[in-house]
Image (cartoon, rainbow, N blue to C red):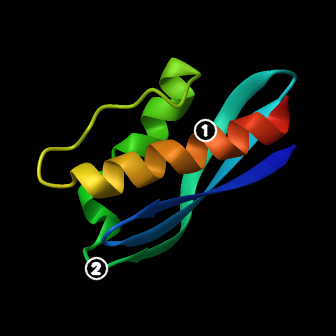
Amino acid sequence: CTFVGYGRSNHGDIQVTVDVLEGQIVDSYITQCLTEYSCSWIVALPPQVVQRQSAEVDIVSGATASSNAFYAAVRQALSKAK
């Protein structure tokens, strides 16, 4: 199943999609990036969601607001999966 979540920051919003199969996160990706800055700064975060099976990702130095928005979006998506 596919779940979508949204995260907000002072620099703009991020939409994340998380795919869950049989209770496991099998994919996570940024589907919309409306931040002032390029989402290339946080491109390493979606694989961490799959690897850790959690929204608990590393904060990217220099992209704290975007990292936090990504985290919030994943949490929202995962809350829909339960």
Residue occupying image coordinates x 82% and y 21%: 23
Residue occupying image coordinates x 13% and y 45%: 61
**What is the x, y in percent for residue 2?**
81, 49
Quadrant showing the C terminus: top right
Mark 1 surroundings within 10 Å by alpha-carbon count, few (fewer than 14), some (14 through 19), many (20 or more)? many
Q: Quadrant of residue 22?
A: top right
Q: Which mark is residue 75?
A: 1
- Extreme-left residue of the structure: 62
Label 2 and label 1: CA atoms lie apart by 22 Å
**What is the x, y in percent for residue 6?**
60, 59
Residue where numbered disc 2 is placed: 36
Secondary structure beneath label 1:
helix
Q: Is residue 22 above or below residue 30?
A: above
Horizontal side, residue 16 vs residue 79: left or right: left
Kind of residue sitting beneath label 1: Arg
**What is the x, y in percent for residue 73?**
57, 50
Residue occupying image coordinates x 81% and y 41%: 80
Mark 2 surroundings within 10 Å by alpha-carbon count, few (fewer than 14), some (14 through 19), many (20 or more)? few
Residue occupying image coordinates x 68% and y 33%: 26
Secondary structure beneath label 2:
loop
The answer to whether any part of residue 16 appears in the image is yes
Kind of residue sitting beneath label 2: Glu
Quadrant showing the N terminus: top right
Horizontal side, residue 44 vs residue 22: left or right: left
The answer to which of 73 and 40 lies nearer the viewer is 73
Q: Is residue 26 above or below residue 46?
A: above
